[in-house]
Amino acid sequence: MKRLKSTLTASLLTLASGVMAATPSSVQKIQVGQGDVFPESITSTRDGTVFTSSVGEGRIFRAAPGADKATAWTAKQPGPQSVLGVYADEKTGTLWACYSDMALTKGNAGQPAILRALDLSSGRVERSYPLPSGSFCNDIVTTGDGVAFVTDTHGGRIFRIEPGGQPTTWLTDGRLKGVDGITLAGPGTLYLTNVQQNELFRLAIAPDGRPGELVKLSLSEKVEAPDGLRRSSDGKFFLAENKAGRVDEVKFDGDSARITVIRRGLQGPTSTTVTNGHLYVTEAKINQYGKGRNVGPFYVYEEPLPAD
């Protein structure tokens, strides 16, 4: 079935002037499964295929290009039962996925996280990487040569994985307690979000591969629960603020970040992805997770970005 146009409320379609010129009729939606999916993360491939994770069902969902529904693409796996960050690396044919225990977010004991590498074509699990005790794997980004960087929200850590290697604790820093989103800006710079402290950071990658300077950025305005941070192929950065219900474009300049709101009125947006000039946003309703309420259905919202 072709994707259906959305009939969203006016508040959802309040866009910042000059950033998105899309009209209400251009916003479309993809339904993600049935029941308590809670789609926490999203990634995409160049052909327009969209993948979303599921905190509630512990699976990964896939929507083919142009589809109006995402269906379960993977089976549940042993170990932690919530899937958070997902990241498609087309160069290596890998879909990276964070499997974590949501009990850790409530201060309870929980299983350590497992990072999995899946075949991007079939969804078959090719490698599993158990992470250290107390870890909460949240998001992933990879470099052009296949090195993966992984955030550990609970432990305030960044793990690093060389192609064919095992995860190592690359950086631990008290300021990263609450680290969530991660994205790469060129070969020597990572940007990070702290979902608990409402902060953004720049982290250098030294020429020898070691972590360099970690800098807290000055923001043009406050953010609330900055979650997924993704870079598009044309070098733009998009941020989901899950508590504020907003999606922003972020422009980094030295030690500063300019926040421009491009969408308001979402219920717990947690991640974005851009492919073929279209921005996709997960509406996870994550603040309702674990409360025993029927808050579905869940949608990914899509609309075209204006040409520069």
Image: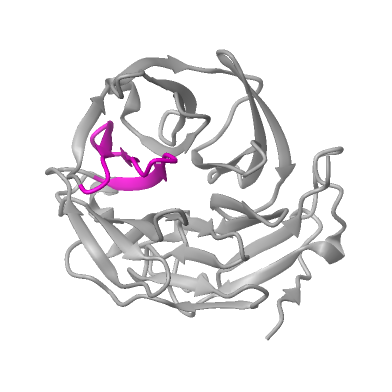
Using the image as rendered, state which of residue 10 and residue 29 is in the foreground: 29
Query: In the displayed structure, does residue 232 sit left or right of residue 120?
Result: right
- Quadrant position of residue 255: top right
Quick check: is 213 in the magenta stretch? Answer: no
Quarter of the picture containing the N terminus is bottom right
Position in image of residue 125 (x %, y %): 27, 68
* Residue 128, placed above or below residue 59: above
Q: Residue furthest bottom?
A: 1
- Quadrant position of residue 244: top right
The image's colour scheme reads one colour
Q: How many marks?
A: 0
Residue 267 seen in the current view: yes
Residue 293 seen in the current view: no
Using the image as rendered, state which of residue 113 and residue 205 is in the foreground: 205
Q: Residue furthest left?
A: 133
Quick check: is 157 in the magenta stretch? Answer: yes
Position in image of residue 13 (x %, y %): 79, 54
- Quadrant position of residue 188: top left
Position in image of residue 96 (x %, y %): 36, 56
Query: In the displayed structure, does residue 248 sit left or right of residue 291?
Result: right
Residue positioned 86% across, 66% down in the render: 25
The magenta segment is 136-164
* Residue 258, placed above or below residue 9: above
Residue positioned 64% across, 78% down in the render: 67
Query: In the displayed structure, does residue 138 sit left or right of residue 279?
Result: left
Residue positioned 62% across, 65% down in the render: 48
Residue positioned 22% across, 60% down in the render: 127
Using the image as rendered, state which of residue 31 and residue 214 is in the foreground: 214
Position in image of residue 53 (x %, y %): 42, 63
